[in-house]
Amino acid sequence: MLAHRRARAGKRFKESVLSFEWDRGGELLRLQQELEGGTYCPGKHRTFLICEPKRRLIAAAPYRDRVVHEGGHGW
């Protein structure tokens, strides 16, 4: 739950976060089972170009993967 809270910081009203929130308990339980069972597989990153302050290509992880990344801190 803490990882979910950290991952959603500043993104509470994004579609992917709201979708995860809709079944938060189920989503977190599935992630836990996949991680413990060794079946977790990261999703496809979304890529987009930004031009400020300089031009660069960004690869954004799916929200579900962001929760996993935040959980890796062990806090």
Image (tube, grey):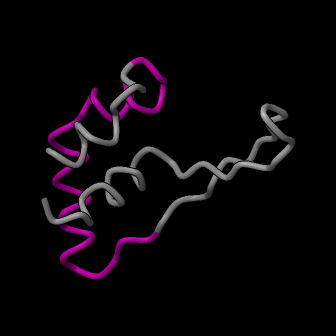
Q: Which residues are magenta?
A: 13-41
- Give x and y (percent) for residue 19: 38, 29
Q: Residue furthest top?
A: 13
Q: Residue furthest bottom?
A: 38
Q: Give the residue drawn at x 79%, y 50%.
A: 57
Task: Kindly report the secondary structure that dominates the magenta region of the rendered protein.
Answer: helix
Query: In which quarter of the view is residue 71 placed?
Result: bottom left
Q: Give the residue drawn at x 79%, y 31%.
A: 52
34 on left or right of 29? right
- Give x and y (percent) for residue 13: 41, 17
Q: Give the residue drawn at x 44%, y 44%.
A: 63
Placement of the C terminus among the 4 image quadrants: bottom left
In this view of the protein, which residue sits in the foreground, 56 or 37?
56
In this view of the protein, which residue sits in the foreground, 2 or 22?
2
In this view of the protein, which residue sits in the foreground, 13 or 22?
13
- Give x and y (percent) for residue 53: 78, 34
Placement of the N terminus among the 4 image quadrants: top left
